[in-house]
Image (spheres, rainbow, N blue to C red):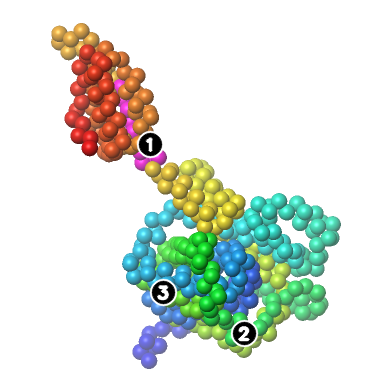
């Protein structure tokens, strides 16, 4: 009872209702776009609220099915079947539990921000491209390049009327409502979330005029829950299946912990414990896997809504899961009124918001190398798949960092001739970091030195000298002394090469 009295209900109760209204259409839309029954998205949202919401970690961020995993989940369902999804998500949860126990949560903050934003941009563009076809009640091609190649034909069908005009008009109208909603008076815009208003209006128009458009198919929670069986374990017997699990784990964990960092900047309450939050997500994904539901992450849209609605404790996110459960149990038939084209519009809007246009513009002005990493990551995801695209982005970010941190300054200057010496000595000064990446330039400079002049090699300014450069300098010094009669001084002496 003391715990209940400690909850600031006048803040958390209204906030939970706002989060529920935002989460409802997104849970359904993500599930439909993933190729699974709509109820499975609600199952993940319920688990994210009632279970993960009550666990320690972050106090205000909200978990559920995320648009960021839609593309990968759809590929997994197409390749292994909906029955195998539970096993993949279960193993994802177990990996997250292991990482939380090993206290690896904080290391996700070391991920390159450009790779993360490139990942989100690639996911957003892939989601957007696929759902453009769903707006016209068309089946989207399988790969990103095929989706792009098919856009001219889709546009031609939309203009000529070959596409379903009713579905297209309803989807475009829903999209316009979503875009225009933020320009309404703040009091109205905050009272009813944009996604709920847009989907609700589309459902009302569909029911009122009995439009012949595809709608969400409703079965019920117990009918769609599917426990993992022996046949579904076959997905783990392939390299692609293991890669899918790793991709689920990496993306779900990264999105959760980056969301936690963003939410912490939005309020003055307790900070997130990253390892506990990763453990909580692992418990939630393990349960979602046992139920055959979608994978979950902490979602920045719902989390930001929770903070902006005035939530003070984790009670608001737990209550939002309760509202999702009550709605699914008491009003399942309401989902059957929702047209698929309206959900496609919600996901087109969500996909576009994942593309960080302002960040890309800022990077192009100030950090072009980071902008290249972001763009390459996004394009790679569209051209290949999510896992390979992220690996390409990480590889490029590591290569870029290695190149930037291996700066080597080489200065060659002529010193005054010593008393009694016939010629002035050439002094070569090295500073910075001497790594194998700069070895060609270093050797080119040294090998151009004249053999008949005294040389002083000063490498005391080096912060780092790797083994490859040590071997190269030692070899060059030995060869220079062998072919030159002029003295060579090395300060400090080079280390012995093993």
* Residue 106 magenta: no
Q: Residues within 10 Å of mark 2 (few under 14, many from 20)?
A: few
Residue receiving disc 1: 437
Q: Is residue 451 above or below residue 289?
A: above
Residue receiving disc 2: 223
Would you say the residues marked 1 and 3 are in contact, meaning their CB atoms lie under 8 Å apart?
no
Q: Is residue 416 above or below residue 216?
A: above
Residue receiving disc 3: 280
| Earlier residue among tags 1 and 3 | 3
Q: What distance separates the C-alpha of mark 1 from that of mark 2?
A: 59 Å
Identified at 38% across, 56% down, the residue is 110
- Can you give x and y, in whole percent of width and height, for residue 223 in the image? 62, 85
Q: What distance separates the C-alpha of mark 2 from that of mark 3?
A: 27 Å
| Earlier residue among tags 1 and 2 | 2
Identified at 49% across, 50% down, the residue is 393
Q: Is residue 476 visible?
A: yes
Would you say the residues marked 2 and 3 are in contact, meaning their CB atoms lie under 8 Å apart?
no
Q: What distance separates the C-alpha of mark 1 from that of mark 3?
A: 42 Å
Which quadrant of the figure has residue 261? Answer: bottom left
| Earlier residue among tags 2 and 3 | 2
């Amino acid at each position: 009872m003391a715990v209940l009295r400690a909850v600031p209900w006048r803040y958390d109760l209204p906030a939970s209702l706002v989060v529920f209204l935002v989460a409802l259409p997104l849970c359904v839309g993500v599930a439909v776009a993933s190729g699974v029954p709509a109820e499975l998205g609600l199952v993940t949202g319920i688990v994210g609220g009632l279970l993960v919401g009550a666990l320690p970690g972050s106090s205000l961020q909200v978990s559920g099915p995320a648009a960021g995993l839609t593309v990968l989940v759809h590929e997994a369902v197409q390749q292994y079947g909906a029955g195998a999804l539970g096993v993949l998500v279960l193993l994802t949860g177990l990996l997250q539990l292991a990482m939380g126990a090993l206290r690896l949560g904080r290391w996700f903050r070391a991920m390159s921000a450009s790779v993360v934003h490139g990942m989100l941009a690639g996911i957003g563009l892939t989601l957007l491209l696929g759902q453009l076809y769903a707006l016209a009640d068309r089946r989207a091609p399988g790969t990103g390049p095929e989706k792009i190649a098919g856009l001219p034909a889709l546009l031609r069908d939309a203009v000529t009327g070959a596409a379903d005009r009713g579905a297209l008009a309803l989807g475009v109208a829903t999209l316009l409502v979503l875009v225009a909603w933020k320009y309404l008076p703040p009091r109205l815009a905050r009272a009813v979330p944009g996604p709920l208003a847009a989907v609700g209006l589309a459902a009302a128009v569909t029911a009122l005029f009995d439009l012949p458009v595809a709608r969400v198919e409703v079965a019920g929670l117990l009918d769609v829950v599917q426990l993992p069986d022996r046949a579904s374990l076959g997905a783990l017997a392939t390299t692609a299946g293991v890669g899918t699990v790793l991709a689920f784990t990496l993306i779900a964990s990264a999105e959760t912990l980056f969301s936690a960092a963003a939410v912490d900047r939005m309020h003055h309450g307790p900070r997130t414990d990253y390892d506990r939050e990763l453990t909580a997500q692992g418990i939630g994904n393990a349960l979602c896997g046992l139920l055959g539901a979608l994978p979950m992450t902490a979602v920045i849209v719902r989390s930001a809504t929770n903070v902006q609605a005035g939530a003070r404790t984790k009670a608001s996110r737990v209550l939002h899961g309760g509202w999702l459960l009550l709605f699914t149990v008491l009003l399942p038939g309401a989902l059957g009124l929702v047209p698929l084209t309206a959900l496609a519009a919600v996901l087109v809007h969500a996909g576009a918001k994942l593309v960080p246009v302002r960040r890309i513009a800022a990077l192009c002005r100030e950090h072009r190398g980071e902008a290249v990493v972001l763009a390459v990551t996004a394009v790679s995801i569209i051209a290949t798949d999510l896992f390979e695209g992220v690996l390409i982005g990480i590889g490029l970010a590591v290569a870029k960092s290695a190149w930037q941190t291996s700066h080597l300054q080489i200065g060659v200057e002529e010193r005054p001739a010593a008393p009694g010496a016939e010629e002035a000595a050439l002094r070569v000064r090295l500073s910075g970091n001497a790594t194998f990446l700069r070895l060609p330039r270093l050797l080119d400079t040294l090998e151009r030195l004249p053999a008949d002049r005294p040389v002083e090699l000063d490498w005391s300014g080096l912060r780092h000298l790797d083994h490859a450069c040590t071997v190269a300098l030692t070899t060059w010094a030995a060869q220079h002394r062998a072919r030159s009669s002029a003295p060579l001084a090395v300060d400090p002496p080079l280390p012995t090469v093993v």
